[in-house]
Image (cartoon, rainbow, N blue to C red):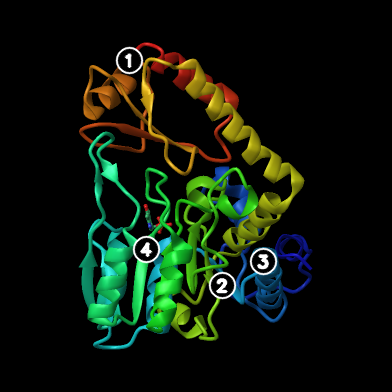
Amino acid sequence: MSLINLLKKKNLITLFTTPSHNQKFFILSKFRQFYKYDISETEAHNPQKALKSAEKKASKIYKTKRTHFLTNGSTSGIIAAVLTCVEKNDKVLIWKDSHICHKNAVKLAGAEAIFYETDYDEEFGISKPINTTYIENLINEHKPKAIIITSPTYEGIVSDIKKIKEICEKTNTYLIADEAHGALYPFNDKLPQSAVNIADFTIQSLHKTAGGLNPTALLHNNTDLDSSKALEMINTTSPSYPLLASIEKNINYLNSSKGRQKITELTENIKELKKNCPNVEFCNNDDITKIVVKSKNLTGYELSEKLYQIFKIEDEKTNEKSTMLLTGLGTDKQKLKKLEKALKNF
Ligand SMILES: Cc1ncc(COP(=O)(O)O)c(C=O)c1O
């Protein structure tokens, strides 16, 4: 039975258990449905089996050894991946500009972080893909237990994950791919290739681009190591079943023809927007859904400010040279038309 069906099932047992809102005491009535499905693991209504089966189905969809549903973001997936394969005093290669959780994960494991850099794209003020020769040299020099890569970056720059995996295999280095911003990749070949079937561990945020609720995410594990113990250490013993059920639904949607079509529509709509705005310059990044744009006469910060002040449009990230507007499954044509109209002014 799917998680959502299990949560919908009428419960005939009187529960003197947590949560004590009894699925009926709606302090915040706007969240009425959420309370209704907010249950715990009780004898009467134990969703653990449904969760295991939903995760198994997900691993079949992604063709991974194990896929874990996360309700504490990619942050928890990256920490769990590091705790799974790294031990005290091991070395871990991490990107100098990575998300803070990479450094924290290494710290929690009692390991030593060795920082690597990426080249800089002067034109758009963003990072370039990882230089694989440089990484190979670093791996040979430091013999790290693991390397964490961020692919894609915020700005949609993807590294040569296959090549990096080949390098890692020579030295038995685990490859952890932070694909927090690439959760749509496994479901559409118009987007870059996902790390899911290449890296040892791949972590994806469903909430960033794939239509998921904050902070739903996935940890894909392709090793024979078990991540359950690591997840147990950092996760609550009272997970949110409405959120877990939403993950199951989210994956099924992404995998459906409707979901795949929606991603294609998004990419087509962005292509059209780019065509209709010839006066601004778009970065030719790997992932078209991250719109990185610059204007001839403005800095990235000025463009960002004008988009916000005049057109009431807020970007995701800005630097001196360019501005990045994040899109995802919820970005419809109308929203993109609003951006197009604004960009035509620059
Ligand atoms: C590259 C990258 N990795 C990891 C994370 C953490 O993801 P989450 O917010 O799902 O915990 C973020 C969040 O912004 C991110 O940008």
Mark 4: is the Cβ under 8 angstroms from ligand 1? no
Relative to the observer, which residue lies in front, 231 or 242?
Answer: 231
Figure check: 327 above or below 66: above
Residue count near mark 3 (Cα–Cα under 10 Å), binned few <14, some 14–19, many ≥20:
many
The image quadrant in which ligand 1 is located: bottom left
In the image, the residue with mark 3 has its CB under 8 Å from the nearest atom of ligand 1: no
Amino acid at the residue labelled 4: Ile
Q: Tell me the residue at 45%/71% (across/down).
A: 165
User: Pointer 1: what residue?
Assistant: 310
Q: Position of residue 41 (x, y in %)?
A: 62, 76
* CA distance separating discs 4 and 3: 23 Å
Residue visible at 32% across and 15% down in the picture: 310
Please tell me whether mark 2 or mark 4 is closer to you in this view.
4
Q: Look at label 2 and name its amino acid.
A: Thr
Task: State the mark number for residue 149.
Answer: 4
Query: Which residue in the structure is indicated by mark 2?
Result: 18
Mark 3: secondary structure: helix
* C-alpha distance separating marks 1 and 3: 44 Å
CB under 8 Å between discs 2 and 1:
no
Side of 297 where 265 appears, left or right? right
Q: Nearer the viewer, residue 128 or 306?
A: 128
